[in-house]
Image: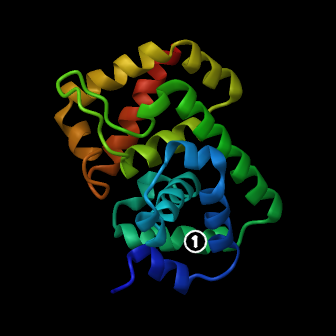
Amino acid sequence: MPLSNQELRHALNPGKAIKLVAKLASFSEFKCVVNLSDSKKKRMDDREFVLGFLAFYLISYKEYQEETRDSFLSKALSKINSLSNEEITKIEETFKKALIAAFDIFNNNAFRKISNKNKRKFPLNKSLFEVWSVNLGRLNIENIQILKDRKQKLIDTFVRYVDNDADFLVSISQVKNKIEHRFETVEKIIQEVLL
């Protein structure tokens, strides 16, 4: 069986980065919201979720334009290898904060599409994991508390965009598409609720 992209990245990028990705994937806060099957974990799918967060947290989505997803994720691994232990500890804390906030706000729908037009429970979504975890990770505790207090408004606003913004729906339906639109829309949703 050929190696998955994440298995290849794991083999080609030894060091601090791979240890950090594995550590974050082992956090109970992560397993609580990203509950993958053993077969997906065996193919390192959980680590690709984590690496997506790390890549977009460390490198602006605006820099993604001319790259493939694979080269962008590999660039993030190189960047992590150059970080200090203090910076890595801060990332670990940010990751936990973002996951706890996502679960407190969205509960079992964290990192899933939610729609009034389609009531089924959608699968976990890497695009949404990246965009929500990075945006929540960048917020301070006070703003996260405001979002928790206004979580129904946040969910309703998110649903409105999923159901009525065709470009946003495309951007969260394929991980490689319309990355800038995906990030800008979620930033806009958060700002609408915070104001």
**Does any portion of residue 101 appear in the rendered image?**
yes
Q: Residue at x 41, y 25 (%)?
A: 189
Residue indicated by mark 1: 77
Residue 132 as seen in the image, left or right of residue 69: right
**Percent position (x, y) of residue 181?**
31, 42
**Percent position (x, y) of residue 9?**
49, 78
Q: Quadrant of residue 163?
A: top left
Q: Amino acid at mark 1?
A: Leu
Residue 186 as seen in the image, left or right of residue 175: right
Q: Residue at x 40, y 60 (%)?
A: 64
Image quarter (top left, top right, bottom left or bottom right) of the N terminus:
bottom left
* Residue nearest the viewer, comparing 141 with 97: 97
* Crowd around label 1: few <14 · some 14–19 · many ≥20 (10 Å): many
In the picture shown, does residue 14 fall above or below 79?
A: below
Q: How many marks?
A: 1
In the picture shown, does residue 26 fall above or below 2?
A: above
Residue 155 as seen in the image, left or right of residue 60: left
Residue 74 as seen in the image, left or right of residue 93: left
**Percent position (x, y) of residue 82?**
70, 72
In the picture shown, does residue 180 fall above or below 136?
A: below
* Residue nearest the viewer, comparing 181 with 1: 1
Mark 1: secondary structure: helix
